[in-house]
Image: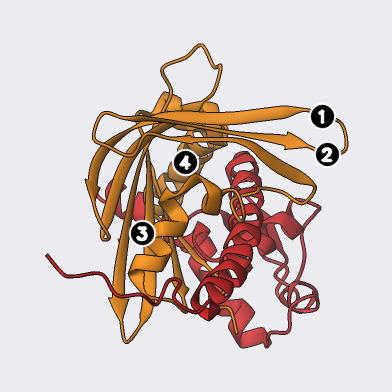
Chain colours: A orange, B red
Amino acid sequence: MPEPLEVSLPNDLEVVVTRRFDAPRAVVWNCHTKPELIQRWMLGPDGWTMPVCEMDLRVGGKFRWRWRSETDGSEFGFVGEFREIEKPARIVHTERVDGADTDDEMIVTQTLVERSGKTTLTVVMRFSSRQARDATVGTGMTTGMEAGYARLDGMFASESV
Amino acid sequence: MRGSSNRLDAVFAALADPARRAILARLANGEASVSELAAPFDMSQPAISKHLRVLERAGLVSAGFDAQRRPRRLEGEAMLEPIEWLERCRAVWEGNYRRLDALLSKLQAQPGGARRRRKKK
């Protein structure tokens, strides 16, 4: 029975995803690093294919992933570079939109921990700046937090000590 | 600002839970009482109230002063964009990982496939 993934936001620049798999780490690693395996599951929303999956799996090596909609043929993709590779435990890579003309990128750290033949994958996605975060996630994060703080300030001010 | 990092933590702890994000999405359509909020979830009123207290401490929801109903209002409308982004991403990742579950099953079922042991270095 698959367990739902857990998402947490430890600070305002990181999203952490945790997911357990019923398989040893080495197999999960292969599924994350071999293009012919990646293309069988990392398909994105329903109705999309992954026509491009290039992986130069070495420190400094680059990757390119592209997805294509079967309904209207629209495409998008990500590119990036591998920063750290420790088989089968850890991969760190940068990730940005393929074809974007900005420097906004994420640093993605994936760690695999195996216990009794099952693997826990932890993915930490870190935005390179608040600007990069807002460009991807939406500026609600910044303005929303400001509003939240202002409201809390008001609450504290109105409470008599 | 004293306690500002606590507030930041409170906002992010509040958003980390999918039930709380769904409560915020519901309140974006207008204020609601605790029982109205509990209805779409398979959750007791005390459980919903617990979520609401987390959201109130984070400044994302306020409670009106109608003594009987105390309707909850959304205070953090600007947070809807990142909340919606998170939900979309979550749905995509979950779809991907379910396909990965199926692939991992297949790979482990193959004789001489993934089960083949490599020498440890």
Q: Is residue B1 visible?
A: no
Residue depicted at x 66% and y 57%: B91
In the image, which is nearer the foreground, mark 2 or mark 3?
2
Chain designation of label 2 = A
**Are labels 2 and 4 assigned to the same chain?**
yes
Q: Quadrant of the N terminus of chain A?
A: bottom right
Residue depicted at x 35% and y 83%: A117
How crowded pointer 3 is (Cα within 10 Å; few <14, some 14-19, many 20+) is rated as few
Identify the amino acid type marked 1.
Answer: Gly
Q: CA distance from mark 1 to mark 2?
A: 6 Å
Disc 3 marks which residue?
A160
Vertical placement of residue B39 versus B75, above or below: below
Disc 4 marks which residue?
A145
Image spot of residue B20 (x, y percent) = 60, 65
Disc 2 marks which residue?
A70
Left or right side of A71 for B9: left
Chain designation of label 3 = A
How crowded pointer 1 is (Cα within 10 Å; few <14, some 14-19, many 20+) is rated as few
In the image, which is nearer the foreground, mark 3 or mark 4?
4
Residue depicted at x 54% and y 16%: A100
**Disc 1 element:** loop
